[in-house]
């Protein structure tokens, strides 16, 4: 109840701020920009966002300024995307998984075992012919993508069950992101998907509303999920990036250029901090939180999700996107 009250008050303040921010954007000054995200301030993504703010302010000689609202203060991912559409929030960092219900193009990232490994993922994400299609797909609904932050690969973690193959998934209630692709994935793997906002995962695991979740290694530590989950299985089933998106409001072309260059600088900075943070998280989860880590034979997982690939390939909107990401990988390439 209290949470909703706090949220209501924050959103009301923001709508007021938003009215002002829109007014200032209308004059094209880019002052007092608001950036929202749902990670704590010691998370590597927050550090990369601080770098983004610093670059924007430096490159504009202080003409453009930005305030960061971390910890989901302005709402869960769905809510801040909506606030970004209206312009009450200027820039938001959300998972690609949360963007899927706004634009189907983002569902490509939720498709399990799409990429062989992180190298393949990064290679595709460094090709503007691919990323521009994704980033610009939401222009008509009020926002555009600026860059992505590597969020590693996602794996399964449970309160108390060790999962060795898909047979062990039966009856397992797994929290997934509010995304149709994630729901379909857990269904295909034989578990019971439970979509919910990220901020609710800790208490839901703790109270047993869910048996499991799936995410990257930093979640164990930064959101303390390692306190309420005993086992981590290296299923590495999806590489779902974090996305930086911006309201498509009326900044000048010069300001937009500053934003784009600053986003690129933040992306490069993130590359450096992310891997160290992930390794440190794994160590802390194992040594201080008592999480047990297990390798799994991924073959039954990969096999179970093949129908999802076939469906996506056959889909009118998603077929071409699938082809963009995977087309060059066929044997005819050489
Ligand atoms: C990642 C991502 C978050 C997202 C979360 C989730 O941790 O960085 O932005 O909210 O996954 O599973 O919802």
Image: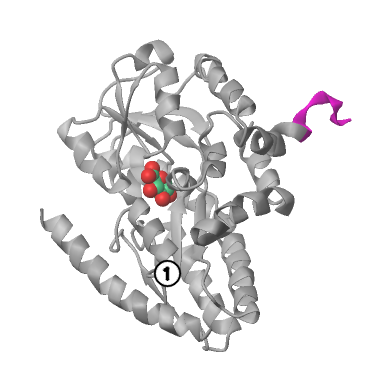
Identity of the residue drawn at 52% across and 20% down: 305
Q: Is residue 168 magenta?
A: no
Q: Is residue 18 left or right of residue 56?
A: left
Q: Secondary structure at mark 1?
A: loop
Identity of the residue drawn at 44% across and 41% down: 216
- Using the image as rendered, state which of residue 300 and residue 278 is in the foreground: 300
Asked whether residue 284 is in view, the answer is no
- Name above or below for residue 7 compared with residue 304: below
In the image, residue 185 lies at what x, y percent?
Answer: 45, 26
- Using the image as rendered, state which of residue 118 and residue 333 is in the foreground: 333
Specify the farthest residue to the top. 167
In the image, residue 18 lies at what x, y percent?
Answer: 36, 75
Q: Is residue 332 magenta?
A: yes
Magenta highlight: main SS:
helix
In the image, residue 324 lies at what x, y percent?
Answer: 71, 39
Q: Is residue 65 left or right of residue 291?
A: right
Identity of the residue drawn at 48% across and 80% down: 25
Ligand 1 within 8 Å of the CB at mark 1: no
- Name above or below for residue 10 compared with residue 331: below
- Name above or below for residue 315 compared with residue 2: above
Asked whether residue 163 is in view, the answer is yes
**Mark 1 sits on what residue?**
87
Q: Is residue 22 left or right of residue 73?
A: right
Magenta range? 328-334
Identity of the residue drawn at 35% across and 37% down: 286
> How many marks on residues?
1
In the image, residue 272 lies at what x, y percent?
Answer: 58, 58
Q: Quadrant of the C terminus?
A: top right
Badge 1 density bin: few <14, some 14–19, many ≥20, Cα 10 Å = many
How is the rendered protein coloured? one colour
Specify the farthest residue to the right. 334
């Amino acid at each position: 109840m209290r949470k909703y009250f706090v949220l209501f008050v924050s959103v009301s303040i923001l709508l007021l701020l938003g009215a002002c921010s829109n007014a200032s954007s209308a004059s094209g000054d880019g002052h007092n920009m608001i950036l929202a995200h749902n990670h704590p301030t010691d998370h590597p993504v927050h550090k990369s966002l601080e770098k983004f703010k610093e670059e924007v302010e430096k490159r504009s000689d202080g003409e453009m300024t930005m305030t960061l609202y971390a910890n989901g203060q302005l709402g869960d991912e769905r809510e801040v995307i909506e606030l970004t559409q209206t312009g009450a929030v200027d820039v938001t960092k959300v998972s690609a998984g949360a963007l899927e219900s706004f634009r189907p193009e983002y569902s490509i990232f939720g498709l399990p075992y799409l990429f062989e490994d992180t190298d393949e993922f990064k290679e595709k994400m460094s090709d503007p012919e691919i990323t521009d299609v994704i980033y610009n797909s939401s222009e008509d609904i009020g926002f555009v993508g600026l860059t992505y932050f590597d969020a590693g690969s996602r794996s399964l973690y449970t309160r108390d069950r060790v999962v060795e193959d898909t047979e062990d998934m039966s009856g397992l209630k797994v929290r997934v992101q509010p995304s149709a692709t994630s729901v379909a994935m857990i269904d295909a793997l034989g578990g019971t998907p439970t979509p919910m906002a990220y901020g609710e995962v800790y208490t839901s695991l703790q109270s047993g509303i869910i048996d499991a979740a799936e995410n990257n290694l930093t979640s164990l530590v930064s959101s303390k999920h390692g306190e309420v989950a005993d086992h981590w299985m290296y299923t590495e089933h999806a590489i779902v990036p974090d996305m930086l998106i911006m309201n498509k409001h009326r900044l000048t072309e010069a300001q937009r250029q500053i934003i784009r260059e600053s986003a690129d600088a933040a992306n490069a900075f993130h590359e450096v901090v992310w891997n160290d943070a992930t390794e440190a998280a794994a160590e802390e989860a194992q040594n201080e939180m008592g999480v047990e880590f297990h390798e799994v034979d991924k073959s039954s997982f990969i096999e179970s999700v093949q129908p999802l690939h076939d469906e996506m390939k056959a889909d009118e909107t998603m077929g071409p996107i699938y082809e963009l990401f995977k087309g060059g990988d066929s044997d005819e390439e050489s």
